[in-house]
Image (tube, helix red, strand yellow):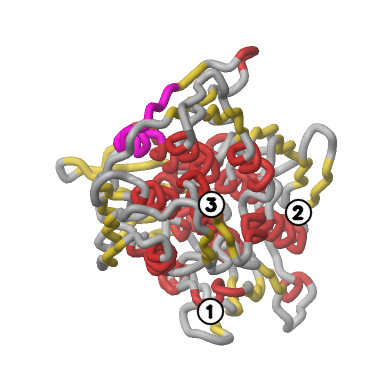
Amino acid sequence: MSKRKDRVIHLNAPSSKSISHRALMVAGLAVGESLITNLLASEDIAWTRACLEKLGVGFEDTEDGLKVKGLGGKIASAASAQASTEPLVLNVGESGTTCRLLTAIVAAGQGSFQIQGQGRMHERPIDALELALKEQGVTFFYLQNAGCPPFILHTGGFRGGKIEISMEQSSQFLSGLLLGASMAKERTVITVSGRKIVSWPYVGLTIKVMQEFGLGPEIEILENGTWQTKPLDEIDEIVPGRIRFIVTPGRFLARTFNVEGDYSNASYLLAAGALKDEPVVVHNLNPDSLQGDKEILNILSKMGARVTWQDEAGGDPARVLVEKQRLHGVQLDMGSCPDLVPTVAVLMALADGPSRITNVAHLRIKESDRLQAVSNELARVGCKTRLLEDGIEIFPQKIPQGQSFFFKTYNDHRLAMSLSLFQLAGIDVNLDNPACVAKSFPGFWQEWAKVVNE
C-alpha cells in the first residue's frame, strides 16, 4: 500500500497514570480542598482512590474535576483511633504504585494497617522498603510470602533522622519515603544505597508534585567530598551513595492541579506512527515533561522514524507528528524507562537488523515477568530472542503476512497494548485478555480503532 500523507490520523494521549497517583496522594495529605483536573480514570487509579477513602480522604466528582478534601498530614487506623486490635485493611489491587507509595505513607501515621492486593501483587517484593522503615520503628508481619504483600504494618509514626533505601528493585520505594517523611517528627535525610538506581524519572515526578503542593525536598549531590544543593531540573546522573534528599516536616497545601498526558500509554500510539503508512499525530503531551517515558520520542528517532513537535492552536499542549521510515536495530539502556520495553521490543521485531535492551532486570517483578513474556510472544511470529541477565536481544525474522496469531497477555496491560502493534505488520492479532488494558488505559481500544480502521 502506498503512503497517503494527505491523510493524518489524530490520536489523544490519556492522562498520566503516574502523575494521577501522586496527585491523589499528595492532595489527600494536604490541608484543605484541592481540585484535580484531567485525572486518569483507570483501575489502578481507582485502587488508590479507594484506599485513600478508607483513610478518611474526602472525594467529590464535579464537572470541573475531582475535589479532594485532605487529611492535613494526619493518618490513623481504626486500631489507633478506637483502640481496636483490628488493622485497617487497604486493598491495592494489582497496582504496584498504590502499594509501595501507600505503604510508606501509612507507615508515617499511627496504628495498624493491612496491605493486601490481587494476582501478581502478592509476588512482588517490598522487603527493601521494609528494611528502610524498620529504621523508623515500623514493624511488618507477613501473612503469606516473606517480603511480599499481604502484610500487617504496625507504626507509631516516622521519627525522622537518617534513612537508607535501595532503588535496585523499584524507584517507588524512595517516592513513598519522600511522601511519608513530610509527616515525620523531625527532619529526615534519605540516602540512596545499593549498586544502581532504576526508574529515576519517576522520583522526579514525585518531587515535582510535592513542590506543586508547597512541600518539596531539598536535593543534595556529593561533589568533591561535600554535599551541594541542586535543583531538580539539574539532576542528570544519579549515583548511589552520592545523592540524598532532605525532607523538613510540614503540610502540603491544597491547590488546583492539572494532570498532563501520559507518555507511557502514548508510546503505543506514537509507535503506530512509525509503522503506519499514514502519519500519526498524538495530542495532549507536554514537551517539557519530566516523565522518563518521554524517551520514546528519542527511541523512535534512533530507530529511523521521523518525529516532529507541532504547536497546537489556542495555547493547548503541543502535539507530536510521527511518520514511517525504515526502522533499524539499536542498542538501548532502558533503565530509566522500563515500561517502554514491550513497545520497543515489538518495534525491534519489525526492524532491519538485531537489537539489544539492557539494564531492565527489574522487569521480571512487574505485572508479569515482562522479559520472559516478551520473549515468549515475539517467538509466536518467528522472531528469535536471547534473554540476558538484565535485558533481551532481539533478532528479527520475516513475519508471515495475512496470518492470524494468538497472543497471551499474562493479564499485563502493557503486553496487550504493545502486541497490538503487530496488526500494522499485516497479521491478525488475537489477545487472550484484551480487557486488561483497563488497568491504565481504559480507552485504548477506542483510540486503536482510529489507527487500524483508517
Task: Residue 271: give x, y in percent of width and height.
Answer: 46, 40
Task: Residue 329: give x, y in percent of width and height.
Answer: 26, 45
Q: Quick check: can you spot residue 169?
A: no
> Which mark's residue is nearer the viewer, 3 or 1?
3
- Asked if residue 306 is among those painted magenta in the image, a careful observer would answer yes
Question: Magenta stretch?
Answer: 297-308
Which secondary structure, mark 2? loop
Kind of residue indicated by mark 2? Val
Label number found at residue 57: 2
Which secondary structure, mark 1? strand
Label number found at residue 140: 1
Examine the image and state in which quarter residue 103 appears: bottom right
Kind of residue indicated by mark 1? Phe
Q: Earlier in the sequence, mark 3 or mark 1?
A: 1
Kind of residue indicated by mark 3? Ser
Q: Name the residue carrying label 3.
A: 420
Say few, some or many: other residues with alpha carbon within 10 Å of mark 2 (under 14 / 14 to 19 / 20 or more). Answer: many
x 30%, y 63%: residue:
385
Mark 3–mark 2 Cα distance, whole angstroms, equals: 38 Å
